[in-house]
Image (tube, rainbow, N blue to C red):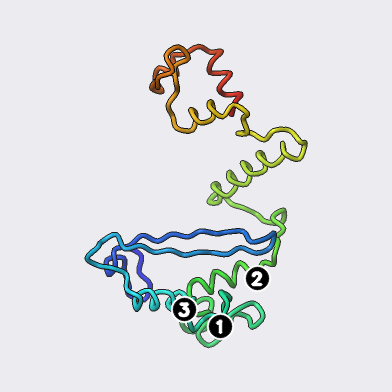
């Protein structure tokens, strides 16, 4: 179980989540969410304020009237070199502030062609290849993969159920695999 500063998920049984929303080509807003999945242990305002402060995004960490942190690139994220030498690797208070220092320190657009990814970065490599593969057809003004005009075929493929051409009733995946080659090819082209 992950624990920062002695606080565990057992203290408040919770689910955490994040959403990153692009604002423009250079800016992204991050939303952090937390839910208690036990009605007997609710998330109180006091607990939430302490949790936000622990991560470096509490009310005292923000520039008044904004969502921007006081610790930012302009002031080198207020690195404490003494703390960096003796206590933490970064010398920056707050896990989210440390993340932001790393992300903003790269600049608005990072040149990934100079990056060397290792074998542990297989997921990153696969994701980038998939994104590039999907992006390239749109440059040639062709339909990108997954852009079908036949909305019914796309809906059937997405939900995993397929309608019989004769009866219109849902069939299982098993019966789909037994269907004709022509029908399967037609559906694949729809993707």
Which residue is the site of mark 1? 64
Using residue 120 as the reference point, say whether residue 138 is left or right of it. right
In-front residue for pair 155/87: 155
Which marked residue is nearer to the observer: mark 2 or mark 3? 3
Whole-percent x, y for residue 76 in the image: 63, 80
Secondary structure of the residue carrying tag 3 is loop
Residues at marks 2 and 3, CA–CA distance in whole angstroms? 22 Å
Secondary structure of the residue carrying tag 2 is helix
**Mark toward the start of the polypeptide (1 vs 2):** 1
- Give residue 105's mark: 2
Residue 127 drawn above or below residue 148: below
Residues at marks 3 and 1, CA–CA distance in whole angstroms? 11 Å
Residue at the (72%, 53%) spot, across then down: 113
Residue at the (62%, 59%) spot, across then down: 22
10 Å crowding of disc 1: few (<14), some (14-19), many (20+):
few
Which residue is the site of mark 3? 58
Which marked residue is nearer to the observer: mark 3 or mark 1? 1
Whole-percent x, y for residue 154 in the image: 54, 30
Whole-percent x, y for residue 142 in the image: 73, 33
In-front residue for pair 151/103: 151
């Amino acid at each position: 179980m992950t624990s920062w500063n002695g606080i565990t998920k057992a203290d408040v049984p919770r689910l955490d989540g994040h959403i990153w929303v692009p604002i423009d080509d250079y800016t992204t807003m991050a939303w952090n969410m937390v839910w208690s999945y036990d009605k007997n242990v609710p998330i109180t305002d006091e607990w939430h304020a302490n949790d936000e402060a622990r991560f470096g995004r509490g009310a005292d960490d923000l520039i008044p009237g904004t969502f921007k942190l006081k610790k930012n690139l302009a002031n080198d994220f207020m690195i404490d070199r003494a703390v960096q030498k003796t206590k933490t690797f970064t010398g920056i208070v707050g896990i989210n502030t440390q993340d932001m220092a790393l992300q903003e320190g790269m600049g608005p657009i990072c040149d990934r062609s100079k990056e060397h990814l290792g074998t542990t970065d297989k997921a990153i490599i696969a994701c980038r290849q998939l994104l590039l593969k999907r992006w390239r057809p749109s440059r040639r003004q062709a339909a990108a993969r997954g852009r079908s005009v036949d909305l019914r075929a796309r809906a059937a493929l997405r939900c995993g159920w397929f309608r019989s051409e004769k009866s219109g009733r849902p069939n299982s995946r098993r019966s789909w695999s037994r269907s004709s080659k022509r029908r399967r090819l037609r559906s694949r082209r729809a993707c």
